[in-house]
């Protein structure tokens, strides 16, 4: 997906991400209320787009989220960094043309939705093909292993919540829990 924004250039959705980018985007989405808005709307059988947009725009994190989801065309998503995120956010905040503003506002919900759906797909794939997670022993030498196990279970729980809401909203057609 290439997004041409008057006065800011062309940006592309990051499709290959580092773990730092994944964690940053996940934290921004949670902190913005987008996750909760999506789950509440889907659980209530409502269209989630308006609620997700209201949560993100009202949180003050809109440009941070865009900076974590987009990179300038020609930049590999694996080159993403917090500095690039900040540069992208700063550039996008300064858009003044009406077409540029409209393009930015119209891309927010599809970007967020694609992130959630990508996460669900990744969860489904990893559950289908990955061996059972290793048990972390209390005397484990690796604190990183403990953090990874905790982070993985949090992410799985987060995606399971969204999947269950999507299942209910779709009448059992997608997001099977």
Image (spheres, rainbow, N blue to C red):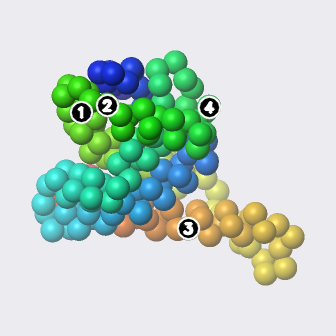
Helix or strand or loop: what does disc 1 sit on?
Answer: helix
Q: Which residue is label 2 attached to?
A: 95
Q: Nearer the viewer, mark 4 or mark 1?
A: 1
Kindly check if marks 1 and 3 are in contact, taking CB atoms under 8 A apart as contact: no
Kindly check if marks 3 and 4 are in contact, taking CB atoms under 8 A apart as contact: no
- Tag 4 or tag 2, which sits nearer the N-term? 4
Horizontal and vertical percent for residue 12? 42, 27
- Tag 1 or tag 4, which sits nearer the N-term? 4
- What's the CA distance linking mark 2 and mark 4? 24 Å
Q: Nearer the viewer, mark 1 or mark 2?
A: 2
- What's the CA distance linking mark 3 and mark 4? 27 Å
Horizontal and vertical percent for residue 139? 84, 79
Q: Nearer the viewer, mark 3 or mark 2?
A: 2
Would residue 111 appear left or right of 84 to someone viewing this image? Answer: left
Kindly check if marks 1 and 2 are in contact, taking CB atoms under 8 A apart as contact: yes
Q: Which residue is label 3 attached to?
A: 153
- Tag 3 or tag 1, which sits nearer the N-term? 1
Other-residue count near label 4 (Cα within 10 Å), few / some / many at <14 / 14–19 / ≥20: few
Other-residue count near label 3 (Cα within 10 Å), few / some / many at <14 / 14–19 / ≥20: few
- What's the CA distance linking mark 3 and mark 2? 39 Å
Q: Residue at x 75, y 63 (%)?
A: 144
Kindly check if marks 3 and 2 are in contact, taking CB atoms under 8 A apart as contact: no
Horizontal and vertical percent for residue 55? 27, 59
Kindly check if marks 2 and 4 are in contact, taking CB atoms under 8 A apart as contact: no
Q: Which residue is label 1 attached to?
A: 101
Q: Nearer the viewer, mark 1 or mark 3?
A: 1
Other-residue count near label 2 (Cα within 10 Å), few / some / many at <14 / 14–19 / ≥20: some
Q: Which residue is label 4 attached to?
A: 79
């Amino acid at each position: 997906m290439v997004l041409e924004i008057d006065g800011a250039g062309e940006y592309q959705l990051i499709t290959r991400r580092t773990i730092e980018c994944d964690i940053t985007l996940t934290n921004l989405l949670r902190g913005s209320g987008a996750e909760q808005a999506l789950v509440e709307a889907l659980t209530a059988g409502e269209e989630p787009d308006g609620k997700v947009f209201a949560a993100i725009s009202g949180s003050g994190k809109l440009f941070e989220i865009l900076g974590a989801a987009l990179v300038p065309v020609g930049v590999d998503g694996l080159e993403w960094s917090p500095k690039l995120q900040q540069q992208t956010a700063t550039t996008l905040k300064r858009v003044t043309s009406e077409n540029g503003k409209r393009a930015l506002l119209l891309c927010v919900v599809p970007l967020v939705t694609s992130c959630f759906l990508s996460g669900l797909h990744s969860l489904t794939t990893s559950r289908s093909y990955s061996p059972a997670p290793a048990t972390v022993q209390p005397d484990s030498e690796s604190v990183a292993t403990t953090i990874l196990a905790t982070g993985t279970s949090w992410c799985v729980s987060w995606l399971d919540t969204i999947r269950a809401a999507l299942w209910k909203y779709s009448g059992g057609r997608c997001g099977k829990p």
